[in-house]
Image: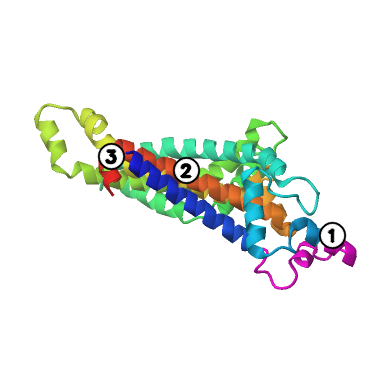
Amino acid sequence: MWNYLGRRLLTSLSILIGVSVLTFLMIHVMPGDPVKVIVGRLTTSPERIEALREELGFNDPIPLQYLNYLGRFVRGDMGTSIRNNRPVFDQIMEQLPNTLQLALITVTISTIFGILIGIFSAATKYSLVDRVLSFISLSVISIPPFFIALLLILLFSVHLKWIPAVAKTGDPRGLILPAVSLALGEIFWLARIVRNAVIEETNKLYPNLAKSKGLSRPGILMKHILPNVLIPTVTAISIQLVYILAGSVVIESIFARQGIGGLAVLGIKNQDFPLIQGTVTVLAAIYVVVNTITDIFYAVVDPRVRLG
């Protein structure tokens, strides 16, 4: 177990280092002077450009620049925003809780309804109900979240006026439409995975053996089938969290929500490369942490994973 854990943590660390290299090189692969790219169309004197180049360390060799960048990042120093002269780390810490709140609520909704719909669809497999659910699932999965968000705004905010599209700070209603926009596709995607996994397990021999021993269908489902469906379900949920964090970039912009997604969009719009580097690295770190926790969960649930 400890060997597997060590290998997995080493893999995660190498991925994070790779991400840090790519985000660091982001500004260096841009054509022209990196400082002039950062400054953009702002009128800046040559003295200010040279001072900014010295401040950002662009006069040092690139390997040394990377080591300095990595050292600052480990200490929680992600640099200073070019546009508002505020520490990037402080801005991310201000906005990250809003994004995590939205992501956790969305994952909770998609997990509960996805598992329930998937089990119900498997219990009624090949029936008219199952076919209707399959059609709905494929249709909803095919619609991008931003289009679902616009439809929800049009229905519930414009026509029915039940839920505001842009809520005041602290108003819990402001989470409803963004969470549903992100969750709808994930619900039916997870439902398809759960349905197929349950049907696959049902077709094996051990459920019939348990049934011959007098165990009821709910008992077989709870004691035998669902534990074996746990690993693909957890895999799907971990992937969902990553997609939801990525989708939050667009959804937060549509609903004018504060969050790390909106912060990344602002950084891209303003060509604020320290801000872009910080948000991309933090999102990548969350992705790696989620996948590492998932892999460790695999090793605990299924000892065969440790031997891989």
Decide if residue 12 is on the left or right side of residue 163: left
Residue 99 x/y as whole percent: 61, 41
Q: Is residue 211 magenta?
A: no
Decide if residue 71 is on the left or right side of residue 199: right
Which coloring applies here?
rainbow
Q: Secondary structure at mark 1?
A: helix
Query: What's the magenta region?
Result: 27-51
N-term-proximal mark, 1 vs 3: 1
Q: Which residue is mark 2?
A: 290
The amino acid type of the residue labelled 2 equals Val
Residue at position x 63%, y 55% from top? 67
Q: Secondary structure at mark 3?
A: loop
Circles 1 and 2: CB distance less than 8 Å? Answer: no
Q: Which residue is mark 3?
A: 302
Tell me if I can see residue 184 in this picture: no
Nearer the observer: mark 1 or 3; the answer is 1
State the residue in front, 144 or 229: 229
How far apart marks 3 and 2 lie (CA) works out to: 18 Å
Q: Which residue is mark 1?
A: 51
N-term-proximal mark, 1 vs 2: 1
